[in-house]
Image (cartoon, grey):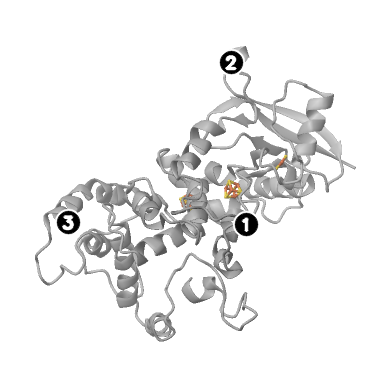
Amino acid sequence: MAEYTIKVRRFQPESGEGPYWEEFNVDLDPSLSVLDGLLQAKDKEDGSLAVRCSCRAAICGSCGMKINGQSGLGCKTQIGEAQELADKFSRASSGEEEALPTHADGPAPIVIEPMGNMPVIKDLITDMESTHWTKIRRVTPWLLPHGEPPEREYIVEPESMIDITQSMACIQCGACVSSCLSMEADPGFIGPAALAKAYRFVGDPRDAETTERLHDLANDPRGIYDCTHCFSCIDACPKGVAPMDQIMRLRRRAGEEGVEDPNSGHDHEIAFVKIIEKKGTLDESLLLQESFAPGFKGKLKPNKRAIREMLGSIPTAIRGIKTGKMRSLHKLIPGVHPKLPDQDDVKAIYRHAEEHNEELNLYIRGEEGEDAQADGTAAEEVTNG
Ligand code: SF4
Ligand code: SF4
Ligand code: FES
């Protein structure tokens, strides 16, 4: 047994007061969970401490919360590990990187907060309906087969379901939604959990409305192209769903289907790949031009939309200069960004991908040779990923 201090962000709406912090001392084995610590505090110190939980085994998805700033499940996070992280953060913030793993005045408290990007109902309980379930329903989360249903079950090749097993592991805990940086900037973004759910049906061979689903998600300005690849949802997900990877799969399928999206999201990706091939590094001003009017450089015939979008991006460019992201004015002129001095290695990657018919996708992870199938073919993630 060991003693821990948990510092909980509380909110009791009936009191009429705003949120506040409260510390509780709990005594439990380091291998037990943060949720066990909270339940002990509730049992022994304050029965009004509100926390949602059911299975206590990372199955029901009820106990999403932020622990030391990281979204995850209370029941899947060991309190001993949470303490180590709290001490590490405490040392980092005090500049004592090399110090012993204790705070100057004893161990740092384990900081527990309700999930982000959702309204708080009470203490650690958030409103999952407004930001999570509404968006899950938005993607039509059920199968849409055509024709008469078979007399018994649908029969599919087991291999054809491999691609969606990862998204099927979702337990709807909302941890990815809580950590999503795009949702923080734009609460209307469909979000990682709902888009991972969308891929579960887009990738299902029994579904007959794949094209319609892809058009819908690509045409929504807050759809698949609103994700900024920040990887937060991958870090947060306790079940290995890797929602960002599912979003990249949706984009790949939309590209394969030739879906033209009004946000030029697909053109933007192609422009990105093209510029890296050419320069080995990203010329951001050229990226803008190529995304809205691919290939117009040299022809001097940008279409009206490209001109409109480029003019519309001037405030963003000014913000970039003000915040130091764009340090020099010449970076605003398309095409003057320098090439990497030696980019043979970069070009070799492109050549290899072309010769082996592999799609370049930096976001779907996997090593060559991993997950080899019994018949010797590589798994989908490797060949197409
Ligand atoms: S990778 Fe995309 S979906 Fe995932 S948290 Fe970041 S912005 Fe959100
Ligand atoms: S994708 Fe992962 S983090 Fe997001 S709701 Fe599903 S299980 Fe939770
Ligand atoms: S209590 Fe069920 S997932 Fe944590």
- Residue underneath mark 1: 240
267 or 276, which is in the foreground?
267
Residue most toward the right? 1
The secondary element bearing badge 2 is classed as loop
Left or right of 158 in this view: 110: right
Toward which corner of the image does residue 298 lie, by quadrant?
A: bottom left
Left or right of 49 in this view: 358: left
Please name which of the two marks, 2 or 3, marks the residue nearer to the observer: 3
Placement of the N terminus among the 4 image quadrants: top right
Q: Quadrant of ligand 3?
A: top right
Q: Amino acid at mark 1?
A: Gly
- Residue underneath mark 2: 17
Estimate the spatial distance between the alpha carbons at disc 1 and disc 3, rounded to whole Å. Answer: 39 Å
Q: Residue 129 location, x and y as percent?
A: 53, 32
Find out whether the residues at labels 2 and 3 contact each other: C-beta distance under 8 Å: no
- Residue underneath mark 3: 306
Mark 2 C-beta closer than 8 Å to ligand 3: no
Q: Residue 156 location, x and y as percent?
A: 57, 65
Mark 1 C-beta closer than 8 Å to ligand 2: yes
